[in-house]
């Protein structure tokens, strides 16, 4: 086991390498003002001439109170030049509708605003009433091009979505929208349909990001979104998140038909994690539709946490990937899929290896109990063909059958990736891995001469010793190209 001293040294090295110059409080210069301080202490005279304002109070409830939001609203009269506003108040439990109303009133003054980001996740006191005034402020922003708002875990209902939709109807310049309502349990198809109808009226949209994980959404709600997509032919980026919603094969089939009409789409993200009524057959049909979208450069697919997804689904995915040689970025999440086996991983590796110009790969295969060392051997056979690969992330956490041999098998596939500059590997709670696995890993990493960023997660291990970690850290120091190192030997 690792001593506290060694763990401390690892963390200090991590910080020194990742953040050689740490800016603790305020970053100001040029047209941007950024602060992590209490709003009460901000020098607003510095802010008035800035075009970008970023305020971050994540988790600091006392610094994002209703009074402080009123103060921010009061100063907006002097912020005529501001074009980008980014307010991060995640986990600020003292913020209520009163503060949001004040903020909404202040928005009316920002006549030059092009982009707004508002993160209110875990602000449990935010309700529909606050959204009502916020929307009134949005309506008064004629130049607004981008909206990104997160209300996850707030007390927002269908009425809140209806109100929010009203704010979109007059946004003639709007190009990008992102709305997050994760775990807002009172939101159902009715609310999503209200928002969807408003979105389809915005003809200039190029990016749509919708997050409704954990809400009461069914095929009916998804079908309405599909109807909206058919009317947004200029769309270039799409992300739909409906994890643990009541989506079935029928809903996914309708979605596939809508996607085919998006002939300009370059990036797609679909998250249906935990939707237990989606089967291999629906995925096969969806993959065929996506294959025909030759404008795509990036795909991010998450169908994890399902007992219904098997190697058959991976085979279909692999066959279609082989015909998508134009892709640059692929992310596949099949974590917690107990029916996935070594055979499926081998097939997936062959599909990935066929994408000649692939730049980035993310594979999430944690808690797949039927993946073992042999599976990684077959996966590496495909990965070693990706000579243009620059970034790779592989998450194999909590796979109990993985051992040192599995690490060695995987690293054999990585050693040929001469263009690789970012590497992230997660072996959390793979208890059979020992110092030998670390040694095999470092031997390959040292030879990847373009590496700039390395992140390794190993913890909950009885077989990795203090000496093993010290040797691994020493090897990492010898990599002259390395700029960022993150080692997590302990949670």
Image (cartoon, rainbow, N blue to C red):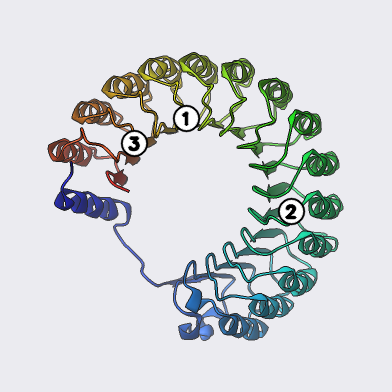
Q: For mark 3, does the 10 Å Cα neighbourhood hold few (<14), some (14 to 19), or many (20 or more) residues? A: many
Secondary structure found at label 1: loop
Picture quadrant where residue 112 is located: bottom right
Q: Tell me what residue is drawn at x 67 percent, y 43 percent.
A: 242
Residue at numbered disc 3 = 429
Q: In this rendering, would 405 be left or right of 41?
A: left
Distance between mark 1 and mark 3 Cα atoms? 13 Å
Quote the CA–CA distance across marks 2 and 3.
43 Å
The quarter of the rendered structure image containing the N terminus is top left
Q: Is residue 422 left or right of residue 88?
A: left
Task: Name which of mark 1 and mark 2 comes first in the sequence.
Answer: 2
Q: Residue at x 36, y 27 (%)?
A: 400
Residue toward you, 339 or 44: 339
* CA–CA distance in space, label 1 to label 2: 35 Å
Front: mark 1 or 3: 3
Is residue 240 depicted above or below 377 in this figure? below
Closer to viewer: mark 2 or mark 3: 3
Earlier along the polypeptide chain: callout 1 or callout 3?
1
The numbered dot on residue 175 is 2
Is residue 484 among the parts visible in the rendering?
A: yes
SS of the residue under disc 3? loop
Name the front one of labels 1 and 2.
1
Count neighbours of disc 1 (C-alpha within 10 A) and say few if under 14, some if 14 to 19, many if 20 or more: many
The answer to the question of whether label 1 and label 3 lie on touching residues, with beta carbons closer than 8 A, is no
Q: Position of residue 356 (x, y in %)?
A: 53, 20
- Say whether disc 2 or disc 3 marks the residue closer to the N-terminus: 2
Residue named by callout 1: 365
Q: Is residue 142 above or below residue 481?
A: below
């Amino acid at each position: 086991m690792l001593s506290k001293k060694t763990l401390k040294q690892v963390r200090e090295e991590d910080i020194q390498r990742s953040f050689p110059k740490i800016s603790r409080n305020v970053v100001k210069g040029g047209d941007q003002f950024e602060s992590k301080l209490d709003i009460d202490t901000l020098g607003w005279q510095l802010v008035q001439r800035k075009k970008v304002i970023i305020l971050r109070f994540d988790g600091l409830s006392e610094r994002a109170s209703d009074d402080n939001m009123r103060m921010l609203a009061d100063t907006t009269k002097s912020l005529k030049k501001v074009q980008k506003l980014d307010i991060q108040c995640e986990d600020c439990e003292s913020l209520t509708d009163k503060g949001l109303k004040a903020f909404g009133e202040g928005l009316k003054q920002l006549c030059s605003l092009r982009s707004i980001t508002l993160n209110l996740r875990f602000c449990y006191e935010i309700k529909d009433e606050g959204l009502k005034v916020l929307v009134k402020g949005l309506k008064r922003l004629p130049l607004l091009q981008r909206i990104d708002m997160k209300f996850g875990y707030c007390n927002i209902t269908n009425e809140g979505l209806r109100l929010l939709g009203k704010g979109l109807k007059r946004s003639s310049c709007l190009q990008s929208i992102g709305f997050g309502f994760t775990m807002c349990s009172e939101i159902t198809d009715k609310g999503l349909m209200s928002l969807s109808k408003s979105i389809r009226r915005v003809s200039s949209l190029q990016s749509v990001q919708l997050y409704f994980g954990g809400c009461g959404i069914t095929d009916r709600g998804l079908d309405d979104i599909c109807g909206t997509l058919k009317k947004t032919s200029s769309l270039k980026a799409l992300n739909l998140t409906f994890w643990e919603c009541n989506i079935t094969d029928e809903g996914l089939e309708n979605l596939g038909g809508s996607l085919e009409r998006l002939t300009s789409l370059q990036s797609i993200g679909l998250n249906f994690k935990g939707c237990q009524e989606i089967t291999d057959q629906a995925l096969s049909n969806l993959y065929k539709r996506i294959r025909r979208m030759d404008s795509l450069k990036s795909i991010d697919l998450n169908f994890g946490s399902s007992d219904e997804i098997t190697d058959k689904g991976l085979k279909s995915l692999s066959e279609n990937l082989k015909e998508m040689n134009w892709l640059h970025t692929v992310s596949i999440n099949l974590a917690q899929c107990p029916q996935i086996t070594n055979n499926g991983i081998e097939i997936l590796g062959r599909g990935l290896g066929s994408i000649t110009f692939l730049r980035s790969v993310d594979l999430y295969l944690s808690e797949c109990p039927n993946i073992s060392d042999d599976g990684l051997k077959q996966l590496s056979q495909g990965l070693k063909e990706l000579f243009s690969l620059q970034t790779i992330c592989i998450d194999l956490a909590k796979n109990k059958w993985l051992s040192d041999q599995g690490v060695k098998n995987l690293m054999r596939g990585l050693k040929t990736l001469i263009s690789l500059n970012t590497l992230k590997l997660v072996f959390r709670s793979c208890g059979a891995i020992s110092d030998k696995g670390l040694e095999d890993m470092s031997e390959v990493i040292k030879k990847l001469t373009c590496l700039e960023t390395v992140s390794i997660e190993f913890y909950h291990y009885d077989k990795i010793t203090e000496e093993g970690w010290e040797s691994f850290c020493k090897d990492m120091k010898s990599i002259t190209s390395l700029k960022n190192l993150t080692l997590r030997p302990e949670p």
